[in-house]
Image (cartoon, grey):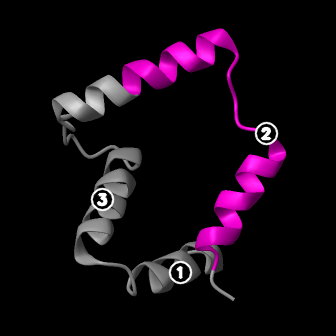
Amino acid sequence: MTKLLERAMERAQALPATVQDEIARLVLAYAGEDEVLTLTPAEEADLLEARAEMERGEFATDEDVSAIFSKYRTP
């Protein structure tokens, strides 16, 4: 395991169990495990809207991204 992945897993341990499970599902899917993710109707609607925004060229500014990262970044 790389140091970066080890650091990420250590940080993930402090997150709520539901978030830890989401991280685990993503890692397993990325590693090729055959788990199918099922979206709720709300998640599917959000995904479709996000795709439409991308097609329209609507992206967050650097300032928007920095504001979100600073909100959740721990010192």
Dot 2 corresponds to which residue? 61
Between label 2 and label 1, give the one nearer the viewer. 2
Dot 3 corresponds to which residue? 22
Could you tell me the amino acid type at mark 2?
Answer: Thr
Query: Which mark sits nearer the N-terminus, 3 or 2?
Result: 3
Residue 7 is covered by the magenta coloring: no
Between label 3 and label 1, give the one nearer the viewer. 3
Left or right of residue 12: residue 39: left
Between label 3 and label 2, give the one nearer the viewer. 2
Could you tell me the amino acid type at mark 1?
Answer: Glu
Crowdedness near tag 3: few (<14), some (14–19) or many (≥20) residues, C-alpha within 10 Å: few
Query: Which mark sits nearer the N-terminus, 3 or 1?
Result: 1
Q: Residue at x 70, y 29 (%)?
A: 59
Residues at marks 3 and 1, CA–CA distance in whole angstroms: 17 Å
Dot 1 corresponds to which residue? 6
Bounds of the magenta segment: 47-73
Report the residue that reaches farthest toward the right: 62
Residues at marks 3 and 2, CA–CA distance in whole angstroms: 27 Å
Crowdedness near tag 1: few (<14), some (14–19) or many (≥20) residues, C-alpha within 10 Å: few
Q: Residue at x 67, y 63 (%)?
A: 69
Image-quadrant location for residue 45: top left
Quadrant in which the C terminus appears: bottom right
Q: Look at the numbered discs 2 and 1 and tell me whether their residues touch, using CB distance below 8 Å.
A: no
Residue 59 is covered by the magenta coloring: yes
Where's residue 36, x and y in %? Answer: 19, 36
Q: Secondary structure at mark 1?
A: helix
Left or right of residue 51: residue 36: left
Q: Residue at x 79, y 39 (%)?
A: 61
Crowdedness near tag 2: few (<14), some (14–19) or many (≥20) residues, C-alpha within 10 Å: few
Where's residue 1, x and y in %? Answer: 53, 75
